[in-house]
Image (tube, rainbow, N blue to C red):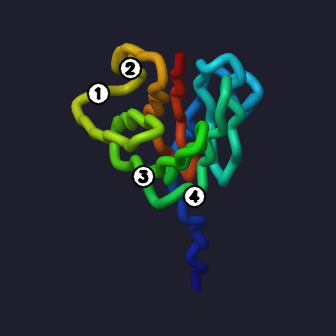
């Protein structure tokens, strides 16, 4: 009588953690330009205002800003997305078609506009590029 050898199932691959130029050094945003990895709610102090990542959702983030007397909120998720936030409102758009490490160009920053780009979202971590003047 022979015994069958028990075989261990191969572990399923886990998604590779995305990387950001500034990692989780949120103080790098202080000058109004950074690329950070976010996996939980965090307040980012920028030149003259605060950007809050209020939630990390299934495939993106919910964000809110306070500047002067106004506040603006937006959700960005699913592929490459960009949000243009001002004291008076928000404009968002999401785009597909980027492959691998290919990155979209940085949108032109204008005075009074905060640009938040969702560059990647993998394994519960969002890569955000933040630009303001």
Query: Residue at the location (40% across, 47% down)?
Result: 76
The reply to whether callout 3 and callout 1 are in contact (CB within 8 Å) is: no
Residue on which the image places disc 3: 75
For label 2, count other residues whose C-alpha is less than 10 Å away and answer few (under 14), some (14-19) or many (20+): few
Q: Is residue 80 above or below residue 104?
A: below
Q: Nearer the viewer, residue 81 or 113?
A: 113
Q: Is residue 85 above or below residue 34?
A: below
SS at circle 4: strand
* Residue 114 placement, left or right of 20: left
Mark 3 / mark 2, whichever is N-terminal: 3
Mark 4 / mark 3, whichever is N-terminal: 4
Q: Position of residue 50 (x, y in %)?
A: 66, 39
SS at circle 2: loop
SS at circle 3: strand
Which label was assigned to residue 103?
2
Q: Nearer the viewer, residue 56 or 88?
A: 88
Query: Residue at the location (34% across, 48% down)?
Result: 78
State the CA–CA distance, disc 1 to disc 4. Answer: 25 Å
Which label was assigned to residue 89?
none
State the CA–CA distance, disc 4 to disc 3. Answer: 9 Å
Q: Position of residue 100 (x, y in %)?
A: 37, 26
Tell which tag, 3 or 1, sits nearer the viewer.
3
SS at circle 1: loop
Q: Residue furthest bottom?
A: 1
The reply to whether callout 1 and callout 4 are in contact (CB within 8 Å) is: no
The reply to whether callout 1 and callout 2 are in contact (CB within 8 Å) is: yes
Tell which tag, 2 or 4, sits nearer the viewer.
4
Residue on which the image places disc 4: 55
Tell which tag, 1 or 4, sits nearer the viewer.
4
Which label was assigned to residue 98?
1
State the CA–CA distance, disc 1 to disc 2. Answer: 7 Å
Among the 4 quarters of the image, the one containing residue 81: top left
């Amino acid at each position: 009588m022979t015994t069958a050898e028990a075989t261990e199932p191969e572990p399923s691959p886990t998604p590779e953690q995305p990387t950001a130029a500034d990692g989780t050094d949120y103080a790098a945003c202080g000058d109004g330009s950074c690329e950070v990895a976010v996996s939980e709610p965090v307040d980012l102090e920028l030149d003259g205002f605060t950007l809050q990542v209020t939630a990390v959702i299934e495939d993106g983030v919910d964000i809110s800003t306070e500047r002067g007397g106004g506040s603006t909120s937006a959700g960005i998720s699913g592929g490459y997305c960009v949000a243009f936030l001002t004291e008076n409102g928000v404009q968002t758009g999401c785009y597909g078609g980027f492959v691998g490490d290919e990155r979209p160009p940085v949108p032109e920053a204008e005075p009074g506009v905060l640009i938040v780009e969702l560059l990647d979202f993998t394994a519960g971590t969002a890569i955000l590029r933040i630009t303001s003047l």
